[in-house]
Structures are given as C-alpha cells and as structure tokens.
Amino acid sequence: MDKRFKAFTLVEMLIVMGIIIILMAVGITAGRYAINRANDVAHQNAVDNMYTAVQAYYADHRSYPAIENFSTALTDDTVEYYIGEYMDDGAFDGGTAATYYYATDTLQQEVLVCVSLFGQYDSGIDGDFYCNGNGFGSENLLNGSITDKIVPRIQEGTTTLDQSPMGEAFNTQQNWLDDSTWGAVVTAS
C-alpha cells in the first residue's frame, strides 16, 4: 500500500512564522503608541481639572495656594488651602506616573499648572510639557517664558538659555524641580 502524507514544507512554515512576527511587531508598536497617548490625555485632563480647582479656590479666597503648599493642597484635606474639594472624585487620577508643576506670580493673581507628558521628570525620557493657566506670556510669571500650552522639552546637551523654549524657567543647569519658582508633585503609578 502506498500512503502519501500531505504536510507543509519547512520553507512554507518559515514564511508563515515571518508574517506572524511582522504582524505582532506592528501590533505591539501601535498598542504602545495608543497607551502612551491615552496617558498623555489623562495627564492633560488632570492639569485642566487642577487649573479649574485653583480657579475655584481663587474665587473663594482671592489668592492662589502658595507654591510651597502645592503638594499638601492636593492631598491634605485638613489644610485651609486644600483644592481637592473643588475637584470631582478621581479628577486628579492621571494615567501613569508623572510630575505636576504649579507656579504663581508674587501677587497671587496669575497661575500656571503643568505636567510632564513623558513620565516622571527624572526618568530621562524625552517628551513635552503640557500647561494650563492664566499666566501664559506674563512677565510677572516665570519672566513670560511660557507662551503655549505644549512646551517642548529641550534636547540633551543644550546649555544656553536662548536655546531653551522655556527661557530662564527651564534649562539643563536649572531644571524645574530645583527651581524655587515652581511647586512640584511627583505622582506614583
């Protein structure tokens, strides 16, 4: 009896495996992009909610919370400058870990709230900052250096202030976390 078995050849199997690997690589890349974009949107929404909360606080108290109190203003409901009461439950939840920034002018009339869109500031990942507030371009707030909602992070190796889109507010020598004009909160994932 002559039996013939039909099967795939080794070349056919390798071609199919190659196609599957290519499709997996494309799918993983698209998935990572979608996750990163979703986190950026969550962080931007958190900044918008924080700005709305500090505006509501301003309406009640005629000044913004001081920058040295920014961390407790978000987390400690026993302090008088607590802005969490002006936010919906979960409004501050924003995707993955990030660093949020808050600055006011000396007269407590202008404010900016920003977030690092690339994760925590010291993570070493390139990305932009997103800001919201009423102090864009104001000479009273960070020397008018922030004029747009999306602020590009300067590239590694940039050392002069005129190469930085943030002017004096941000450069490689004096980052946002060390600058006394900002209050900063690092959120964990």
Image (spheres, helix red, strand yellow):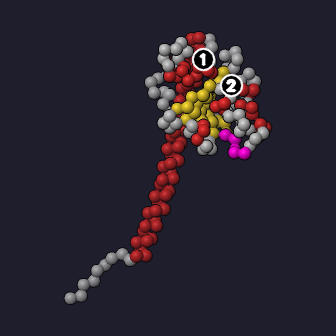
Q: Is residue 95 visible?
A: no
Q: Which residue is mark 2?
A: 181
Q: Residue furthest top?
A: 61
Residue at left 72%, top 26%?
142
User: Callout 1 environment at 10 Å: few (<14), some (14 to 19), or many (20+)?
Assistant: many
Tell me the quarter of the picture where residue 120 sits: top right
In the rendered image, the quadrant that contains the N terminus is: bottom left
Rendered position, 16 above or below 82: below
| Circle 1: residue type | Pro
Tell me the quarter of the picture where residue 121 sits: top right
The residues colored magenta run 153-157
Q: Main secondary structure of the magenta part?
A: loop
| Circle 2: residue type | Thr
Label 2 residue SS: loop
Q: Which residue is mark 1?
A: 65
Alpha-carbon distance for marks 2 and 1? 13 Å
Label 1 residue SS: loop
Residue at left 48%, top 49%?
31
Q: Are marks 2 and 1 in contact (CB under 8 Å)?
A: no
x%, y% of residue 95?
A: 49, 36
Q: Is residue 143 visible?
A: yes
Residue at left 44%, top 63%?
20
